[in-house]
Image (spheres, helix red, strand yellow):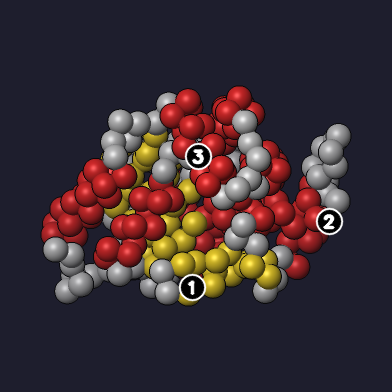
């Protein structure tokens, strides 16, 4: 039972990389008829743009000045087609490209740039201005929507998350090895947790979920029942 007669709320789902939060968030949005926004995809799009424009050399540091200057040229959209949602960069469907290990290896550096965060936070807040949205990321409950009515913080061990990421990459036909994926997960956790601007952390009023030993169905049920509990109390 969902809550279409109740007022719309904001659902913020934060957590570590590959914790399964995006799948849970997408399924919840579908179940309750809300819009779903994958904020990580937005950081990935900016990273892909930076890579394509030579701002992330193979050896050397990210060219932050060039990236900040280019921000107005990066238009991010989500193309919704039935059940599926594709991330668009300046009108091009980049959904598959932004999930590559190359983008994953560079995205945390890009996401640590304050001007990038400010620009994407403003876009994310725009999506939520009518409420009725499920958004997942790292700082949704702390910075983007500190007043969200429902906040969840998802975690599982780095090893569990690396296995999940590997399975996803293999399913998409991409080349990857477990040790490399695990190293990427641990590296990204570190950058996400220690950056100065909006570091990854649990909002004080978020509900924690360690989903390491839960099936996907159990996670979806848990999330839906939390939503129903919150909406009934509204
Ligand atoms: O959820 P993801 O793995 O697709 O996110 C990609 C990167 O983007 C991740 O390393 C951290 C960053 N990110 C962020 O800093 N803030 C968000 N709200 C979402 C993602």
State whether residue 117 appears in this view: no
Residue drawn 30% across and 69% down?
A: 33
Task: Report the side of 67 relative to 218 (left or right).
Answer: right
- Please name which of the two marks, 2 or 1, marks the residue nearer to the observer: 1
Within-10-Å neighbours for mark 2: few <14, some 14–19, many 20+: few
* Image coords of residue 20 (percent x, y): 41, 43
Residue drawn 79% across and 61% down?
A: 70
Q: Quadrant of the C terminus?
A: bottom left
* Image coords of residue 3 (percent x, y): 18, 67
Q: CA distance from mark 2 to mark 1?
A: 27 Å
Within-10-Å neighbours for mark 3: few <14, some 14–19, many 20+: some
**What residue is disc 3 on?**
167
Does the beta carbon at disc 2 come under 8 Å from ligand 1? no
State whether residue 178 appears in this view: yes
- Residue 65 in the image: above or below residue 181: below
**Mark closest to the chain's N terminus, 1 or 3:** 1
**What residue is disc 1 on?**
80
Task: Report the side of 6 relative to 171 (left or right).
Answer: left
**What residue is disc 2 on?**
53
- Please name which of the two marks, 2 or 3, marks the residue nearer to the observer: 3
Residue drawn 70% across and 51% down?
A: 47
Within-10-Å neighbours for mark 1: few <14, some 14–19, many 20+: few
- Please name which of the two marks, 1 or 3, marks the residue nearer to the observer: 3
- Element type at marker 3? helix
Between 178 and 209, the residue placed more toward the observer is 178
* Image coords of residue 221 (percent x, y): 22, 49
Cβ–Cβ below 8 Å for labels 2 and 3? Answer: no
Dot label at residue 3: none
């Amino acid at each position: 039972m969902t809550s279409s007669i109740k007022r719309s709320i904001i659902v913020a789902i934060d957590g570590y990389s590959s914790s399964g939060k995006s799948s849970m968030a997408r399924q919840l949005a579908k179940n309750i008829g809300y819009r779903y926004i994958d904020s990580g995809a937005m950081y990935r799009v900016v990273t892909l743009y930076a890579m394509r424009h030579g701002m992330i050399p193979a050896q050397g540091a990210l060219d932050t000045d060039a990236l900040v200057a280019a921000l107005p040229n990066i238009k991010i959209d989500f193309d919704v087609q039935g059940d599926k949602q594709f991330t668009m960069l300046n009108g091009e469907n980049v959904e598959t490209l932004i999930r590559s290990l190359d983008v994953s290896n560079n995205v945390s550096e890009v996401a640590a740039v304050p001007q990038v965060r400010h620009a994407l936070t403003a876009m994310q807040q725009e999506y939520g201005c009518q409420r009725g949205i499920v958004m997942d990321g790292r700082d949704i409950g702390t910075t983007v929507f500190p007043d969200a009515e429902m906040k969840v913080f998802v975690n599982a061990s780095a090893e569990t998350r690396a296995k999940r990421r590997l399975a996803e990459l293999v399913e998409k036909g991409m080349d990857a090895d477990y040790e490399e994926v695990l190293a990427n997960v641990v590296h990204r956790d570190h950058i996400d947790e220690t950056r100065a601007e909006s570091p990854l952390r649990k909002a004080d009023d978020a509900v924690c979920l360690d989903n390491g030993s839960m099936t996907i169905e159990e996670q979806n049920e848990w999330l839906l029942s939390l939503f129903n509990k919150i909406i009934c109390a509204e």
